[in-house]
Amino acid sequence: MDEEKIIAEVQSCIDCMICLDVCDTFVVTQNEVLSPNGRLKIVDKIFNNQNITQEEIKSIYTCTLCGLCDLTCQQSIHIADAIHASKIKLVEMGLGPLENHNKIIKNIEEQDNSVNGKREERLNWMPEKYKESETFETGSSDTLLFLGCMSSFRVKESASASYELLKEGNFDFKIFEKEPCCGEYVYSAGKLDFAKKIFNENFELFKQHGIKNIITTCGGCFYAFNNLYPKYIQDYDIPVKHVIQVIHELKKNGKLKFRQSNDTVTYHDSCRTGRKIKNIDVYDEPRELLNLCATVNELKANRELTACCGAGSGIRGVDSSLSIKIGKKIFDELETQDIITSCPLCVFNYRYVNYKTQSQIKTKYITDYLLNALEES
Ligand code: SF4
Ligand code: SF4
């Protein structure tokens, strides 16, 4: 969106306040500065070069960019895009991103990951039995399983279980030995030039290794490859699937079988495997697969209307108490002890919320759950 369009959209707000109740950062704080309407007022100030306070900058950086407000806005304002555009503007003005974002971005520059991991530990997730046979970039497949920083370092079983299920289903793919960061974190923080540099460098790397298809485990990478790379790279032409779509196809073709159990679990849709993803819905596949193994409960807000887990867009580094309150709000609604999701960032945040609130909720990444229910062939 160009600046004039952003200002025109922002100024079309009629202060109906309908968007407030869908925004979790408002719901858990009752602070209008942390609402879509409140943030649009700050966006207006930023694009009109008015002075803004630290509290206002923090408000922009505590938006999870979940996009739920866009669905309710009476004036069809692209609220999340306007908030993201204001982050880019804040970076241009030297007022963004915030200190914690800069630390993470430095780690991306130095260690190629957004989670403070060490480059040499990136493959620690790999199951022992595959270590000797893995050929990485030299493999002949044109399909890349892109694990992402969160799966590789923080929720390693999401990487290992995804990899193992694909192997069990005789699916042809390869992985990179030295996988880069997808750049989504940098983009979300508003550092557009650096994000574009990462996108372009990765595209060159993909071309160099003959990659024609990408599979991701992480909602953030899925969003980056599906929405952002085609937006910023003119000739970008690599389709992406979420790993659960591929597992679903393998099941449909009889390559994988799962056994039923007495479990009752709740499935949580991540914003970045659903609402935020252009032209792809990943709503039915996880439910169909989980239904083969368990009774699946729904949250009140599900599918396109799902709530953010509380970790989107770097909010944890700005105000982790907000992440905890948003995650706890979802916990309070659960009727099961187990919650399953298709994004490792949601898994990571729910485990953090569980620890901080001394709850008894167990969170699993979906392929980790499915691997445990795999029938041996
Ligand atoms: S994108 Fe999500 S967190 Fe941000 S203002 Fe809208 S509803 Fe609130
Ligand atoms: S719903 Fe739209 S028009 Fe109404 S207050 Fe929110 S941003 Fe403004």
Image: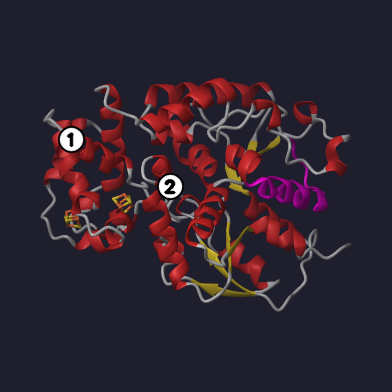
Is residue 162 located in the magenta-colored stretch of the structure?
Answer: yes
Identify which amino acid the numbered label 1 is placed on: Thr
350, 72: nearer the viewer: 350
Return the x and y of residue 88 as percentages of the image width and height. 30, 29
Residue highlighted by disc 1: 53
**Residue bearing mark 2:** 312
**Vertical placement of residue 7 versus 23, above or below:** above
Q: Which residues are magenta?
A: 155-174
Q: Does 332 sit left or right of 290 as displayed?
A: left
In the rendered image, residue 228, in percent from the top left (x then y), is placed at 45, 36
Q: For the residue marked with disc 2, what is the amino acid?
A: Gly
SS majority, magenta: helix
Residue 121 appears in the picture as rendered:
yes
Q: Position of residue 129 (x, y in %)?
A: 87, 43
Compare residues 181 and 245 and report the one nearer the observer: 181
Above or below residue 10? Residue 189 is above
